[in-house]
Amino acid sequence: MKRTLLYSFFAATALLTAESAGGIRWTAPPTWKAQGARPMRAATYSVPAAPGDKEDAECAVFYFGPGQGGGIEDNITRWIGQFEQPDGKPSRAAAKISRQPFNGVPVSLIDLTGTYMASAGPMSQTKTPKPGYRLLGAIADSPQGAVFFKLTGPLKTVVAAQPAFQNLLKSLTR
């Protein structure tokens, strides 16, 4: 009886923490706080600031539907365009781009540090420069359309959150 109750508790906890979009499921790290609904997002998580950083990071998850949201390379190029390098060199040269499967889900990855040109809001042309920021991005391929995971924030905070982001990716399933 106790074993059944314990199993039920863990199963219920997993259901509460598992998220999904576009036929992809993931489990958000327990220290990340789910935020309310936002336009164009399947989920948004606040990632606690690391000691020394003044701002939390954010992990936004986007899903636009089959054939929507642009291609993988288009999105990687757009994300790179949201950063400037302190030395003035192209951010494309500073970006680390790779591809890796997680539980059979093909994922394109990007890692980029620099000055993040943060948008004031969806469709806003106003940009606020945020030096010393980092982006960890992942685009999961799904037959129902790509699911985009974009973690951005102060460098120390994103460095501290990188293992949790990797665990989120390791939890991906179809």
Image (tube, rainbow, N blue to C red):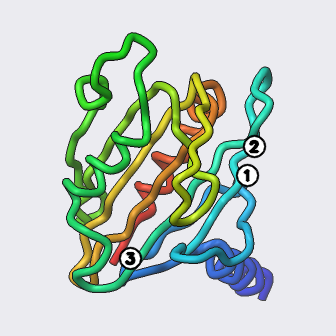
Identify the residue at image location x=30%, y=46%: 109
Q: Which mark is residue 31?
A: 1
Q: Which numbered dot is residue 143?
A: none
Few, some or many residues within 10 Å of mark 3 (<14, 14–19, 20+): many
Judged from the image, the secondary structure of the residue bearing numbered disc 2 is: loop
Mark 3 — residue? 24
**Tag in front: 1 or 2:** 2
| Separation of residues labelled 3 and 2 (CA atoms) | 25 Å
- Amino acid type, label 2: Pro
Callout 3–callout 2 Cβ contact below 8 Å: no
Q: Residue at x 71, y 66 (%)?
A: 34
Q: Which amino acid is tagged 3?
A: Ile
Q: Earlier in the sequence, mark 3 or mark 2?
A: 3
Earlier-in-chain disc, 1 versus 3: 3
Q: CA distance from mark 1 to mark 2?
A: 7 Å
Q: Which residue is mark 2?
A: 48
Compared with 61, 65 (above or below) is below
Picture layout, residue 63 above or below residue 46: below
Q: Amino acid at mark 1?
A: Thr
Name the side, left or right, on which 133 lies relative to 89.
right
Q: CA distance from mark 1 to mark 3?
A: 21 Å
Badge 1 vs badge 2, beta-carbon distance below 8 Å: yes
Q: Residue furthest front?
A: 125
- For the N terminus, the quadrant is bottom right
Secondary structure, mark 3, is strand
| Image-based side of 111 in relation to 132, left or right | left
Count residues near mark 1 (Cα–Cα under 10 Å), then give few for <14, some for 14-19, many for 20+: few
Give the mark nearest the N terminus, 1 or 2: 1
- Which quarter of the rendering shows the C terminus? bottom left
In depth, the one of 48 and 167 nearer the eye is 48
Q: Is residue 14 left or right of residue 62?
A: right
